[in-house]
Image (spheres, coloured by chain):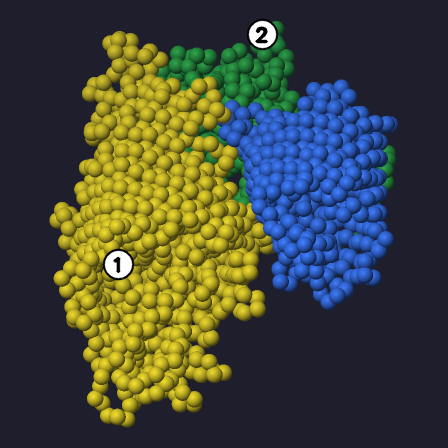
Chain colours: A yellow, B blue, C green
Amino acid sequence: MRLILTRLIITVVAVLSSLSAMGYTLRVTVFDDAEDEPIVGASARLTRGEAKLASVSDADGVAVFTKVSGTYELVVEFVGMSGYKQKVSISKDTEIVVKLADGKALDEIVVTATESKGATSSSKIGTEAMRHLQPSSISDVLELLPGGVSTDPKMGEANIVHLRQAQPVSSSENPDYSTDALGTSFVIDGVPVNTNADMQRVSSSQSGDNADRSTVGKGVDMRSISTDDIESIEVIRGIPSVEYGEITSGVVNIKRKEGVRNLEARFKADMQSRLFYVGKGFKMPTDGWTVNVSADYLDSKVDPRNTRENYKRLTGSLRSLLKRPVGAFELSWNSSLNYSGTFERDRNDPDLTINNTVDYYESNNNTFSFNNTLVFTPDKSRRLPTFTFTQGFSYAVSDLHREKTVASSRIYPLPVSMEPGPHYVGYLPMLYLANLDVEGRPMTAFARFAAQYRANTGILGHRLKGGVEWNFSKNYGNGQVYDIARPISAEMTSRPRPFKDIPAENQLSAYVEEMMTMKLGEHQLELMAGLRETQLMNLSSDYYLSWRPYIDPRVNFSWRLQSLMVASQPMRFEFAGGIGQHTKMPVAAYLFPDPIYRDFSQLNYYHNEERYRTMNVMTYVVDPTNYDLRAARNLKWEARIGADYRGNSLSVTYFRENMTDGFRQSGFVERYVYNAYDASGFDPYAVDRAPTIEELPYVEEVRQRAETQTTNGSRTLKQGVEYTLKTRRFPKLNTVITINGAWLRTVLDNSQALWYKPTVVVDGKELQYVGLYDDTDGSTYESFNTNIMFDTYVPELKLNFSIAMQNVWYTSSQRHFLTGVPSYYLDPDGVIHKFTEESASDPQLSNLIRHYASAAFDENRVPFASNINFKATKKLFNDRIDVALYVNRILSITPEYQRYGQTIRRHLSPYFGMEINFKI
Amino acid sequence: MAAMMLFAAGAMADESWRYSVVGENSSNPAEKSRIDFENSTSVTAGFNHELEKEAVVVEEGRGHNLADITVVTRQHLKKGRVWGGASFTTGSLRDIRFNSASDYSNVSPYVVADSVGGSRSVQQYSFLGGYSAEAGERLTWGAEMAYRAGIEYRNRDPRVKNIVSDFRLSAGFTASLSDKSYLGASAGLHLYNQDSDVEFYNPMNSIHEFVATGLGTTFARFYGSTSSSAYKGLGLVSNLQFVAGNGMRLAAGFDYDDMDFILRDYNDLTLANIDNYRVRGEIAYSIGNVGGITEFYDNAKIKPHLNVDWNRRIGRENIFGTATGNSYPVIGDRQYYWRDLFDVDLTVEMKIPIDSRRIVLVAPEVIYAFSDEHYRQPVRHFKADWLTFGTKLGFEQITLSLLKYGINAGVFYNAANDKESVFEGYDVEKMYHQAVLHNFEMLSSDRFGLSADMFIDVPISTITKTFDDQPGRVFRRVKNSLIFSASFEHYAYSHHGDINQVSVRAGLKF
Amino acid sequence: MKTKTIIALTISLLASQAFVSCVENDETAIVNCKVTIKNTFPEVIPADAKIIDGKATFYETNSGTTYARDLNSEEDLMLPVGLYNVEARATAEYVNPDELTVEKNIRASASAVVIQADTEISLEWFITMESSSFIFSEMYHTGSLNAAGTGGLYDHFFRIYNNTDEVLYADGLGIAESSFTNTKTTTYEILTEANDRNVNFTAQAIWVIPGNGTDVPVQPGESLLIVDQAIDWSAQVEGALDLSHADFEWWDDNPRDTDNPEVPNLEKWYSYSLTIWLTNNQCTKSYALVRFPEGMTSTDYLANYRGSFDYISAIGTYMTNDKSYLIPNEWIIDGVNLSNKEQWLYGALSPQIDISYASISDIERDPNRFGWKHVRRVASTAPDGRKTLLDTNDSATDFILKRAKE
């Protein structure tokens, strides 16, 4: 919650009224000072002695008292907001406007996430909470969500978001279940971050050290988003409004700082990285115009010993906010020019480059974006809608360069050719210097036109929202550029493919939403129902998804009961819930995958005489595009109970999500036919040349392999209970206790049958049978955790310190039982048979039965472990300088446990850092 | 201060920089309510350089270059007093061999080691916070927490990376017996954790690690395949104080530490365990009072004080049976190693005020100390004791403009007498054996020491106060001042080179 | 950290745990326990045979100390608490069925014996018989240095030697590589009995010399050179070997392997890897020479001798390895365990086939191991120059290291 001083404005407007002399009407309009919106449901009371009059503000925020005169004490309250108390004297019809600020006492600091009171469950995190957390990037902020646990920053790999997922899953990056991360949308100042065109990866077969740095198909890499320029983050874990598209799990809505602010600078050092930030908000000469400029630089080493693996991030932003009346509207034009660069460079480490070998890796990524948001708000009296036009454009120059001395350990034939058919191929030299470049030029564009209309009919308040959105993404880079005869590693046989051959992705969506509020006495109902329609354009017609509309209905409701008096203090309950469908289109890399190259050696004739040597290879180029690929859809519903009593708030949410068509690399069977030439009868000395395939006898060989393509084969079922309890600040100890946590259960398995061919050589030949297994090869994960945070504020010393005890009661993972017996199998001629009893005893077919240790399906349960984290911030020089330090796992309790007769011992070491913030 | 004394006794290298902020923790936090002090906060930057031509202890390297930023504060609150500090230290440690762990004095003799070693970079964060208050007229109580976290690493083979976490908590009380005498007691907890890991990046690496178990012995079974180890220590600290009205102070302290040495590569098995006992005693008489001229020493005119420090460390190795999977059952243990360190130190401080602004100090000192280290099988035994004579001369002045400065100089002579060494199974090729002998030679050789230090406190702004009961008198007090201090130490070992240590500190006090 | 009660001010040096009837030497605080030996003889030696001049060495693995003991001495056999590897030699004197007193030299070995209290160690003696068939005479698995000197090439080979005095036929002879490695780094616990090394040898790759009985004759004192890639490596990398004249090469039907038409290929009965079979250049596996029973084809072998086993891995998880086959110990005519001194745990072969191991280096992954091969010692040279190589089924004494070039 932002730290804002209370602004107390009373404008008394006298309205002469000729009503009956008995009394006058008093209209009290209640406004939320921060959001500049009327507050619905605020309670207003007029008291004089024991005379008490009560009223509640309607959709326009107006509470009416009739037949009042004389002096009263007016009290206006809304839970979670600071109260307002004022003596008023009524001698005629009067109207009072009351602005309520955030419910924080003057020097109140909130260092945790607060559950928002809206219809859908979301957590709001303000600057004070982020300042206390001392994050290096967005991924550190997720610790504050219910179910979140503090983890050390992992700067050596892409940080992928996992909302509402049981812990053991989020730690293992299984590419088959990354749709969940892909379906979490990051929105910065209204413009969603589009990663569909990111393809910056080295070819998979040479994964080695940088596979985990690529984010293709995994969504946004949170390392690249810095937190210092952010005013507030709202993480919507529940059913987001239809305004947000391209999602399956949730939205991270980021609002950056705007308006005038003094120069802020930050220096942070922790065990892995150094971070510098500086930012300032200016007031421009012409009024109504403010400009914000900021820059931040992060340099981190994954392991201080490894001078090679480092990650550098440089971001800069220039944002202008212009407010100008235009005709009957007030225009607020927010325009921003942003730069974000990430650099990874591996200098030559003397121990790795012995005997003057070279091993050099460098990856630079420079992203420029230019966004504009124009909001036309009508002045209060006119019944006109508010119009918003948002535009986003981003272009990135990404270059990866790799140089490596390759000394191969064998004589490797190099069967690489770009076209199908038989080819004569050469051999790899024993020592060469290999170069590899990957050039990516992803470009994205975004435009949205939306309108919002607010109206009241009787006790019903309406807020109608509608909008049309257009999303474009295309990569214009050359992709991987290298000499295929001198690959970066001797084993690599993949071929380059320019990114610019991959067509653009165009997506059109529209949404309409109605938010209706109803007031029955102190009860207050809110219903939000919306429809979102989206489809991909410009795909060729043989794609199922071409112009295929997807409709996402989403409904959220909340009911705040009237307050019950408990020990003469108001206690208010709230029931909320929602159900909604969510859709995520596949990224370009799934719709237009790289072709697969398969080579089969037809003639392998490595004669002792160099001039008699020859090798002939049949190359197949297979197009693994799945034209039947559909969008991933996730049906989510949740129910929530909230309660507020004397400043303490509790919220418990049950949710259940089921996505049956997540993206997965599943097998499809491909048959290859080639000739095996027999050169035993050929005498090279007689003809003094190497044999050619035309003159040799041959036997036709058939090979079947399970190749992989992107399908909708992954199912992700997520359910759980999230709870958050926040107490008010206890007076004497000046401490707020926040208890939050979650019981989460995640089931991941394949929703379609899987082809699998065992990699085993029997009788001198590769086994040629492929099995179809339809038992669900998946796992169930569970985790249950509770974080108890004591944050104490000592005003006298201007010191704020927090002790957080993060208890993980248990985490468990269990693999679903598999018989391992296929239901059908494909014989070498490509004919499908049922897998029967006697096929189980056939020497060749028995290899299709996959054996699992009996205990492989036991539940692997990791018992209780607890960490204690300590953080402290101290303000010096009357709040101009802020010194902060944190130690994660200053103490940790990790009891050892038994598993299969072995004692498993666990150990954790602390992680610590310090920082200084200046406000000049 | 205790670590300094043992260093003076030559038993181990100067590791006092590790405890720069944390080390300040008082033996009984409750006593802070009994000394009067002015609110003061100082922000200083320091640089500390030490170079040993031959390492005093091979496993602790040949010196260091360290820079630090330190903030220390003492404030009176409405009720009670609060004191604290934070410091960030970074720098490099020079040429550490046969030890890939940190804090060798805490964790010896059990370390993962290799013969190459080398210099390391170090970063350390430490902070400390304490609070003390009166409870009624006769009682005061106090509590103090200190935390030190450090990382040491090398980016050349052998690539060491150690993370140390040292948490201390202590609380105590004092009860006045008469108006000037009181009795005090305090107890404390000490949690120590270290994770140590070694990696090799060179594909053709020929260095490899072994498990050292003291005095040149190794643990054969895990020879070679160990690279990551850990230490887990739990310690108890207890102190008693008695201050009599006539300026006599009696203090005694007893610490007990239990430290496990764990091998990560073998499913965290506890290879060995250290039991560390320590008894400290102190008797001091403060006679007369020089009235606040000196900044560097306390106000006693003549102050004889006697310090006794005795430390016994026992090392026990486990014996393991057949491994089931990766867990090794313990089938027995054997107490192979123990070491005694003892020293008694008598000093007489005499301060002779020349006038109300200048004072001279003379402090003769005599130390007797011995070290006795044993390993059972193969039999290894090293014993040496020595006598140290020395004196320190000092001069301090407060000028009219409230500028304070002070200079001290000291000279020591250290005569080692009878020494005894048994080394069963000595192998001249083994560099590890040569290192053990070198440590003993340094321990038992005569040495001559010179030390000098100075400080200047330059006031920037002063406050003038007048008291109505003393009309006409104007009291001026320093509000903010620039402080600068430097120290130099030189130890010359007979035919073993010399040790030079220079440290400089400058900053702002307000 | 042991949950130990914190003792107050008692400072005591002694009192390690008390043991059942072990006596503690108060000077060195070492606890010695009584050890009794139970002998079991092979069938051919009667139970009442007399052991004369029996010598045994007890190697305590924790402290690395070796205790030599005489098995015939009267007083008790006392050993300190610890984990022991035992090796014993003796001569057994007994009366054979036709009333002659016969002497036979016998040997025994026991590994991972825990002595924590008074213990009885059972020694299974066996007769060290002279081998009379094909044996491994040279094994080169480290490879020469590659062109940049940063690793090893795969110019690996086996040399199979006819150690008898008559012609032997190598048709159908199999070379098998062990699934288990012989070193500490893979300390997992095998749960299935069939894979007990005293019953079967668990193999992950089996290659067989082609021929139908008499196609591959090997004269006495001659040998077969079997290589990975039959190539003149020295033409490609200076200092490497010229294997272009090898007798056989193992070729994987894979586009990344080369096939030299002038060198016949081995039959690939089974291989755990789909790509190329490489012999591990850290030299930590065991290799066996297998004589399959008459008329056994690969299909009936593969149908009946599947060897998948369950085990608990180093991090305590239940695993299954279903990529291995079983070879009964009776079919193995020669076997060699390879390891380095530092990491040696115990061999994948039964002690009767190889009681110890041929060591390539002191330390693990020693960079100077490249270019060295294991060569069997010469036991004796016949007048016509034919050499008989030493084969006592004890690779530590049978093999020495030589430069690969010699």
Residue at the image position 62 percent from the left and 60 percent from the top: B77
Q: Is residue C146 left or right of residue C111?
A: left
Instruction: Give the crowd class for mark 1: few <14, some 14-19, many >=20 residues within 10 Å.
Output: some
Q: Closest to the observer: B90 or A92?
A: A92
Chain holding disc 1: A
Q: CA distance from mark 2 to mark 1?
A: 89 Å
Q: Is residue B344 left or right of residue C363?
A: right
Q: Is residue A503 above or below residue A95?
A: above
Residue C175, percent from left and from top = 48, 27
- Residue for badge 2: C385
Q: What's the mark number on residue A728?
A: none
Question: Is residue B503 among what the camera can see?
Answer: yes
Secondary element at image label 1 = loop
Q: Is residue A737 above or below residue A905?
A: below
Residue C89, percent from left and from top = 73, 28
Q: Is residue A303 left or right of residue A284?
A: right
Amino acid type shown at disc 2 = Gly
Q: Closest to the observer: C320 or A216?
A: A216
- Residue for badge 1: A244
Secondary element at image label 2 = loop
